[in-house]
Amino acid sequence: MPVILLDSVSPYGSRRVTVECDGSTTAAYLRDDETAISATWIANHVTPPDSVDEAWLAQGRAPLMPVTRSLTATRPPLSADALEAVWFEEGDGVAVLEHGRLLAVLPGWSSMARGLPGYSRDVVGQTPFGWSLADALDGLGPRVERAVAYWRWRTSADGWADYQQAVLGHLLRRLGPGGQYWEVSGGRQPQVGVSERPGSFTVLSTVGMSCQRMPVVEQVVDEPSDYARIELAVATALPPATVARVFGWLATYPWQAVTWFGPGHTVRWPSSAGSFPLAATSGLEGVVLLDDDMVRELPGPEVPDLSGFVFGGDPVRWLWVVPITEPDRLLAKDRGSAALISRLTAARRGWVVG
C-alpha cells in the first residue's frame, strides 16, 4: 500500500489532495468524495525506463516517468515534514510545496477524464502523467502567491471583521439601516451571514459569499472577474427569519458542490435540506437567480440598486432569488432563462416573495 506523505482537505471540505509514495514513485492526487479527479507524477525512486512501461501500468501501479521526460531521473523519497498544501481561494485547485518551494500544482481545470494532468516541477514538456510546471509558471506562480496571501489575510485576526463591515456599510448606503443578522453557514467555510433590511418589503442579503471567488467560473466565462464574486438577495413580505433559512443551504452550495451561480441559473431545492423556505404557495420547489436587468422585467416595485461593491479587485454582483416551480426550472433548462422570465411576467408572478 502507498505511504501517504500529505493529506489535506480544502477549507470548504469539497476536495482532498494526497501525496502518495509506493516505494517506486511519488504522485499527487486531487479527489472528491468518491474518486481521483486529477493527478500528477512527482518523482521516481527507482531507475525509470526509456519509454512508458505499459506492463508496469497494467499492474495498476503509479507510472514511472520515462528518463527523457524528467529533469531528475531518480531521487530519494520525499519527507512528509517538508510538504505543505496551499489551496486556491476557490477551493477547487491546490499547490504542493516542498520546503516552501513549488513542487506540484493541481488546478481546478486539471482532469484525468479529459487528459489534463497536473503540473510537476521535474516534468519535461507535456506527458500523460504530468505537465511541466516550469512551462506554466508565469500563470501558476502568481496564482499560488495570491492563494498564500489570501489565506494569510482570511485567517488573520481582523480579516473577516473588516470584510463584514465593508459589506454591511455598502448595504447601509444602498438599503438603509439593518435589522436582524443571522449566521447561516453552521460553522463551515465559507462563512456567511444574512442581513435584514426592513422597509415596505424586507430585503435579505447574504454577507460572505463574495469573500472568496466561486469555483469553475474561470473555466466557463471569458471574463471571470465579472462573475467570480456574488452575493444573493431576496425581497419578501413573509416572516424574514423563515425566509432567511433559504441561505443556509444555498449560500454555501457553490463551494460545497464545486460549481458556480450566475445570472439566470436555476437551482432545485433538495429534500435533504428540509422544507423549502420560500414556498409561499404550492408547487414552488426551487429558485432562479436573476441579475438587476433580469429582475426588473418582472412585476413588482422598483428594484434596489446594489451595485458598486468591489472586493479583491473584482466587482461583486448581487443575484436576486426568485422561487419557481419544477416546470419553470425545466423550461429554463430547455429554452433558457429568457423563456422563464417571459412566463413569470405573463403570469404576473413578481420578484417579491409572498
Image (cartoon, rainbow, N blue to C red):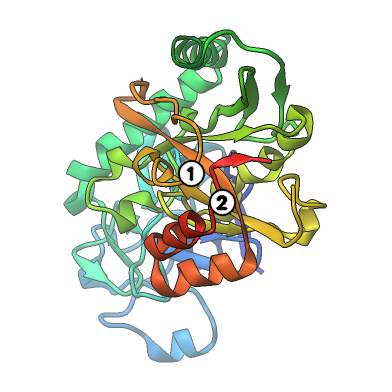
Disc 1 and disc 2: Cα gap in Å?
Answer: 7 Å
- What's the residue at 42%, 49% (across, down)? 262
Is 69 situated left or right of 30 in this image? left
* Earlier residue among tags 1 and 2: 1
Question: Residue beneath label 2, please?
Answer: 349
The amino acid type, in three-letter code, at marker 2 is: Arg
Question: Does residue 288 show up?
Answer: yes
The C terminus: image quadrant: top right
The N terminus: image quadrant: bottom right
Total of numbered circles in the picture? Answer: 2
Closer to the camera in the image, 237 or 65: 237
Question: Does residue 43 show up?
Answer: no
Q: In this view, does 171 lie above or below 148?
A: above
The single residue placed furthest to the right in the displayed view is: 274
Q: Which mark is residue 109?
A: none
Q: In this view, does 224 lie above or below 184?
A: below
Q: Is mark 1 on a helix, strand or loop?
A: loop
Measured as percent of width and height from the top left, residue 186 is found at 75, 33
- What's the residue at 63%, 21% (across, down)? 195
Given contact means CB atoms under 8 Å apart, are the residues at marks 1 and 2 in contact? yes
Closer to the camera in the image, 2 or 120: 120
Measured as percent of width and height from the top left, residue 236 is found at 65, 33
Q: Is residue 61 above or below residue 347?
A: below
Q: Which mark is residue 299?
A: 1
Q: How crowded is mark 1: few (under 14 residues within 10 Å), some or many (20 or more)?
A: some
Measured as percent of width and height from the top left, residue 105 is found at 37, 50
The amino acid type, in three-letter code, at marker 1 is: Pro
Closer to the camera in the image, 54 or 147: 147
Q: What element carries label 2?
A: loop
